[in-house]
Image: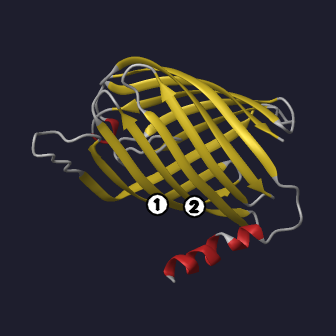
Amino acid sequence: MKRRSLLILFVLPALWSPAQSNRWGLETYGTAGHNYAYGIYSRVAAIGSYNVGQNFVALAGLQCGTGASPMSGALGWYSSFNVGRFKFFVHNRYWLNMYWRYNIREMGALAEGGLSVGGWHMGIGLANRWIFPMQPVDRTGSTEYVFEPLNLVYAIEYKFNFTANRLWSATLRMASYDDFIIDRAYQPLLSLQVDRKVSDKVNLWARAVLRPTGIFSLSANYFEFFTSIGAHILW
């Protein structure tokens, strides 16, 4: 009953919007970077979406890479509604990361709410994470796991346009999660993304991301740095 109430509260209002054409979307990108734990790597990812008007988006993504980087999958949805100049949203996401080299499987779920106004986008929420071996770690068949409940997640970003026609823009972001990454609140991902709008249906972008080390990034070293280049297409 409780889940049904949440569905009615957050999802159905988004679907009850003025008649607009629904759209499919596809975002693909390649990534190259260095991780302190498993060295230099490369990855490719694809995220499909289905847009209902302007207020609801369902997502499904897959990512795979070289070396010890994980194979990842994600499912999620966004629902939003406008109140004056403010856009409020809720976001739900589930993910799975398979670290084959280390015999580790990571699963989790995220729930977030927030708002957008002007160039600002701000969200805060909670995430649960389960980490356990893919195969028994000893002769007893033990598959003990680690459960991290109610981790704080957040995202703060600001987007600004270089030109009046908004063909070029850049976004600065600090967040505890990304498309396939959920990190601890005190170890944020810091990113800069530059977008080039080719048309109403095609957008090209490039992104640089830094994952610092230490509590609140006080260490001089970094845990991971990577760059991505991609495209987002609607039809």
Name the residue carrying label 1: 125
Q: Which one is in front, 211 or 68?
A: 68
- Tell me if mark 1 has few (under 14), some (14-19) or many (20+) residues whose alpha carbon lies within 10 angstroms of its own: some
Name the residue carrying label 2: 114
Placement of the C terminus among the 4 image quadrants: top right
On the question of residue 176 being in view, the answer is: no
- Tell me if mark 2 has few (under 14), some (14-19) or many (20+) residues whose alpha carbon lies within 10 angstroms of its own: some
Mark 1 or mark 2: name the one nearer the start of the chain. Answer: 2
Q: CA distance from mark 1 to mark 2?
A: 8 Å
Q: Percent x, y for residue 11?
A: 66, 69
Element under disc 2? strand
Residue 233 versus residue 142 in the image, above or below: above
Q: Residue at x 67, y 42 (%)?
A: 48
Q: Percent x, y for residue 190?
A: 48, 35
Q: Are marks 1 and 2 in contact (CB under 8 Å)?
A: yes
Residue 63 - label: none
Q: Percent x, y for residue 73?
A: 50, 42
On the question of residue 212 being in view, the answer is: yes
Q: Residue at x 50, y 81 (%)?
A: 2
Q: Is residue 105 left or right of residue 116?
A: left
Residue at far bottom of view: 1
Residue 77 versus residue 221 in the image, above or below: below
Q: Which one is in front, 135 or 131?
A: 135
Element under disc 1? strand
Quarter where residue 210 is shown:
top left
Q: Residue at x 36, y 41 (%)?
A: 187
Type of the residue with mark 2: Gly
Type of the residue with mark 1: Gly
Q: Is residue 67 left or right of residue 227?
A: left
Q: Give the image's coloring scheme.
A: secondary structure
Tally the marks.
2
Residue 183 versus residue 10 in the image, above or below: above
